[in-house]
Amino acid sequence: MSRIFEVVVFTAGLKEYADWILNQIDKHKYISHRLYRNNCIFNGGVYLKDLNRLGRDLKKTIIVDNIAENFDLQPENGI
């Protein structure tokens, strides 16, 4: 995917834990950027992932997440 798309991981996980996992699965550095829990907005018990923090054109941005509430700020971008 990284040949065609910019790959960014935006996790609600803590940086230390997320980096440990990502370093194991991304040995070839295909992930361009990493965002963590401290980049989320905590609201109503949910860590919201604000895609505006990426500084990218949202018309060309998607988020794939297992919890739909995480992308409530940009629901049209979520899968």
Image: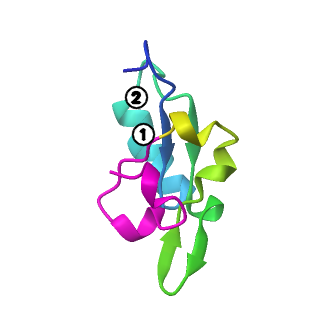
Q: Residue at x 51, y 71 (%)?
A: 47
Question: In 3D space, how far apart are the residues under numbered discs 2 and 1 (Cα atoms)?
Answer: 6 Å
For the image shown, how many numbered marks are present on the structure? Answer: 2
Q: Is residue 1 left or right of residue 72?
A: left
Q: Residue at x 55, y 65 (%)?
A: 73
- Against 39, residue 25 (above or below) is above
What range is drawn magenta here? 62-79
Dot 2 crowding, Cα within 10 Å, few <14, some 14–19, many 20+: few
Q: How is the image coloured?
A: rainbow
Indicate the secondary structure of the residue bearing disc 1: helix
Q: Amino acid at mark 2?
A: Asp
Q: Residue at x 35, y 65 (%)?
A: 68
Q: Residue 22's quadrant in the figure?
A: top left
Q: Nearer the viewer, residue 66 or 34?
A: 66
Q: Which mark is residue 22?
A: 1
- Dominant SS type (magenta): loop
Q: Residue furthest left?
A: 66
Label 2 sits on residue: 26
Indicate the secondary structure of the residue bearing disc 2: loop
Q: Residue furthest bottom?
A: 44
Q: Is residue 63 left or right of residue 74?
A: left
Q: Contact (CB < 8 A) between labels 2 and 1?
A: yes
Does 69 appear in magenta? yes
